[in-house]
Amino acid sequence: MSKDKSEYLINRKDNQYEVVIGLEVHAQVTSESKLFSTSSTKFGAEPNTQVSLVDAALPGMLPVINEYCVKQAIKTGIGLKAKINKRSVFDRKNYFYADLPQGYQISQFKDPIVGEGKVILDMPDGQKEVGIERLHLEQDAGKSIHNLDPKNTFVDLNRSGVALMEIVSKPDLRSPDEVNAYVKKLRSIMRYLGTCDGNMQEGSLRADVNVSVRKKGSKEFGTRCEIKNVNSIKFMQMAIEYEANRQVNLIEDGQSIDQETRLFDTKKNETRSMRSKEDAHDYRYFPDPDLLPLEVSDDFIEKLKLEIPELPDEKKKRFIEKFKVSPYEATILVSDNETSSYFENVIKKSDVKLATNWIIGELFAALNEKNLEITESPISAGNLSKLINLIKEGTISGKIAKTVFEHMMEGDKDPKKIVEEKGLKQESDPKALEILIDKVIDNNRDKATEYKSGKVKLFGFFVGQVMKVSGGKANPQLVNEILKKKL
Amino acid sequence: MSDITKQSLSELVKNIKEKKISSIEVTKAFIERSEKSKELNVYVTEDFSAAIDKAKRFDENPNLDLKLPGIPMAVKDLFCTKNVKTTAGSKILNNFIPTYESTVTQNIWNEGAILLGKLNCDEFAMGSSNETSFFGCVQNPIDKDLVPGGSSGGSSSAVAAQLTPITIGTDTGGSIRQPASFTGIVGLKPTYGSCSRYGIVAFASSLDQAGPMAQNVRDCALLHEVISSYDEKDSTSIDFKRNNYVKELTNNIKGKKIGIPKEYRVDGMPKEIEDLWKKGIDYVKDCGAKIIDISLPHTNYALPTYYIVAPAEASSNLARYDGVKYGFRADGENLIDMYEKTRSEGFGAEVQRRIMIGTYVLSSGYYDAYYLKAQKVRKLIKNDFDEAYKKVDAILTPSTPSSAFKIGEKTNDPVSMYLNDIFTVPVNLAGLPGISIPAGHDAKGYPLGLQIIGKAFDEQNILNIAYAMEEKINFKNKITDWWIK
């Protein structure tokens, strides 16, 4: 396998294969209540405590659409620069399973609420556009629990009827890295919009991954396999890598690929056949007669457009233009709304360049180490801003600042106080520095002579000695100036 | 007062309001007659002692401003009733006790009525003779071993036999109008969206509609006024201005234009039906209405269309009866085995037949040829009515192609059974209101009905036409109480 620049290819003897990937992301809509009932969607409640008569499919119970979920789907569509369909239809997808109380899932088949759109990815070698095929609303199923009893399966219907958005990409992705970037970007957009919390641990974001391979340069798609219900980006990448190689091996062996649904075994790191095309369910889709077609007006959509915040792409553009940060830095700063607003709060009163470096460098590293989100950062934006100003004013050196920063991470303390308490203030009094420097020259007479006779490299040695003697507090710029004069 | 059960709903309401009789007297009278009428098999569940308690409580503190003050009433067992077993005529729900009340029945209790019990019906309302019920056939009080029609057969029989002053049924393809016709009573299928479907066990969601079944048109108007309401819990419920159907009831139909569709003269229709229709035409003429010949060209396709759309929806609606959550469960080796056994043992033959038809017409490769085509034809059928209503105010047809038949006569011939609905099904497909009124008897003395079909939301108009005709027809049901020993 080679990773020639950014191109992801699978090499075999004389052949190079390209991998073609499309994703069906299932994103849980952020809403108080379910898609067609008033029960709560809160995660982690006791089993079967958030189940209405509708969710349990009691006789004569009817679905009533939750307008808020419709708004969330449309907002997401706007965020994906997609066509909003003013008329969409809910269909029934019929199949039997113990955790599907109605015996059908209400979904959108022929006429989804959102049509074609796009997502821009920032890859190391530039931007890449990924097409969105559609976004539709559907109900989640309940949960079957098989490990509580040797003979019986238990069913928890808390999730039954929770609203999901299924976001289907075009087969535009070409590598595990692009899949990583795509899912992160999608997640970022939805988090900016507040339409999905993107919490993969809680199952708020899962994906079915369609993978096929073809010889490099070929225009035709290969036969694809769908890997069902993968719930982390890492697993998606692993599954793609395994599956693409499996398909390539089959082709190289002169065999054909069966179109089928596969499962990814995270323990064994392999995909396994779940059901073939012949065994595929016949879902008998038809329009749900309990629900009228969903119609929204231009006015309804326009009002929602007013609620759309600045999204990552626009924010990135603004950061680059206004704050002169690099595209790379901007991408990191806008990756989520919390980071970008932290950044904007810091630079309200401090230098942009320093702030960018400190956030992307020290702060992210420190947070990572402590496994904290930026919203949980012990250092507030205000105090980081103060620290940066101390550096900028010359009160402390960059090196001392790192010490101060470490103290700040222990508890959000005002950096000025830390500097005072610990006596870390930079020495910028020329007279005091002269005394220090004289002492250093006196103690190193031989080296001073060497320097004067032309060994200019020794200048660095003297700077180092002065800094050492001052405990790192000497103002480096002044030290340079005075040393030059004295030597 | 031994003649209490002979009184119409309107008379009972009047007498209770004038304090001439009490709710408990009325309730007891209907219970007593019901006790003597077990042979008719109209009840699946009797709730008599609770009814007596409720009647006593009503009498202690009577609210006489209500529309149904202390009136006892049995309802079709397709309506979910809180804390009272609701079976839909099926073994699969034989142990099901809802914790909730359907909107239609709630509307009835809100007006002061009292539940007597739950009335027999075809299993999941699938049938035209009440013979598909898990709880056995219902006897038509007209004659022994005669079907009462279906699916609201327990309801029609109970009203005709005066075991309840009035009742409600549901009508998906004729299930109110056909049994009304077979038992000599009045039955109204309202406009789709007029009565909430919330809490009614679903058969075919795009066709199901609840409606009143009564001894006369005025009673029918009164109950319709009570049950018709906009309901946010049913997304297909329609928010339109409802009439004061009783107050606005009039026999003045002068100048109304009544359409006679030539396509309803079906081959092999008995002469008695033909004659009845002619008589009906004469009655409306007598009332000053105008007769206009019209055409509903797609009538022939209504029955096949219905028998695709209704089973398709039913196959999906009945998927929830899987033995997992409530209702009957047969043990199985595994989940699939449990499903198969539960549904094989829990559903009767007709329900299984329709689930299979519905599953077939929705399956991939057949969807376009059947379901999609049927939806298109359905639109054409609706267009036929829209065209006709440019020229007429209402349409007059027979309710059924024959009078009631004997129990067992058609059980082995589903197609001949389905033909019963030939005049009623187009009305459901078009979502229109239709009313059946008793209009005469055949040679055997069995009642025959005429149907008046209205424009959408125009229940008042067809009630008025029915009211005017009722006066002219002066129908008397020939019931001998043969089942009371």
Image (cartoon, coloured by chain):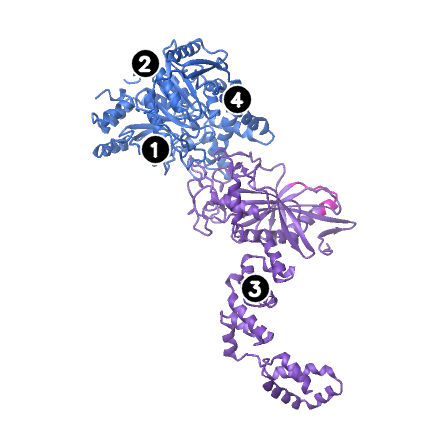
| Residue position marked by numbered label 3 in the rendering | A368
Q: Amino acid at mark 1?
A: Asn
Protein chain holding label 3 = A
Give the residue type at disc 2.
Lys
Q: Please tell me in which quadrant of the rendered image residue A464 appears.
A: bottom right
Mark 1 and mark 4 in contact (Cβ < 8 Å)? no
- In front: mark 2 or mark 1? 1
Residue at 49% from the left image edge and 42% from the top image edge: A99
Q: Quadrant of residue B146?
A: top left
For mark 1, what is the residue?
B107
**What is the three-letter code of the residue carrying label 4?**
Pro
Task: Give the labeled residue for mark 4.
Answer: B304
Task: Depth check: give the residue in front, A28 or A145.
Answer: A28
Q: Give the distance between the C-alpha atoms of the residues marked 2 and 4, in whole angstroms.
A: 35 Å
4 or 1: tag closer to the N-terminus: 1
Chain A rendered in what hue?
Answer: purple
Q: From the rendered image, report the letter of the chain displayed in blue.
A: B
